[in-house]
Amino acid sequence: MMARGDKRLAKFRQMNIRIPAVGALVALSIVAGCGTVTSSSDRVNFDGQSFRAKAKVVDKKVSRTDFTVVVKGVSASLDGAREAGRYEGIKFCIANFGSSRIVWKVGPDTEPKNLRISDDKLTFAGTCQRP
């Protein structure tokens, strides 16, 4: 029969094995969730091109519904860049407000001469409409 001290020692050894294993599992989960690697097959192409686009709020203190979209690589295809900007704006509004309705100040349907293009970047500005 095991003495009382031996039982405690056995439990302590089990904990010493479990804690690092659980810690490693938690660390792997955190690392896996931090960044999603998007393969080229998962990207949405527009006019046969892949564009890097990002939408963000203009000023959180003034209005969370006002946002801009910046599309990089507009020289590859203006039409594709316009659609990539529309897509990114819709994604932004759905994620933040549950609606795809947008009132564009400068957007995908703006006349080409009135678009904001600088340093091979196209910039749109819009306002998400709440449902």
Image (tube, rainbow, N blue to C red):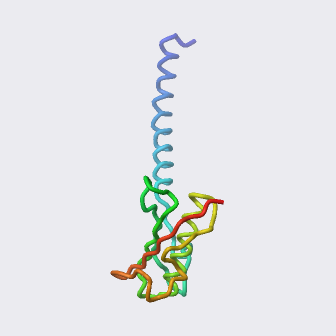
Residue name at image x 46 percent, y 58 percent = 35
| Quadrant the C terminus occupies | bottom right
Q: Give the answer, above or below, for where 72 lies relative to 21.
A: below
| Quadrant the N terminus occupies | top right
Residue name at image x 41 percent, y 87 percent = 75
**On the picture, is 12 further left or further right than 93?**
left
Residue name at image x 60 percent, y 63 percent = 129
Q: Give the answer, above or below, for where 94 lies relative to 79.
A: above
Of 85 and 5, the residue lying toward us? 85
**On the picture, is 98 further left or further right than 75?**
right
Point out residue 36 in the picture as x, y percentages from the top left corner: 50, 61
Point out residue 78 in the picture as x, y percentages from the top left corner: 47, 87
Of 64 and 9, the residue lying toward us? 64
Point out residue 117 in the picture as x, y percentages from the top left corner: 39, 82
**On the picture, is 13 further left or further right than 1?**
left
Point out residue 56 in the picture as x, y percentages from the top left corner: 45, 63
Of 125 and 49, the residue lying toward us? 125
**Number of numbered markers:** 0
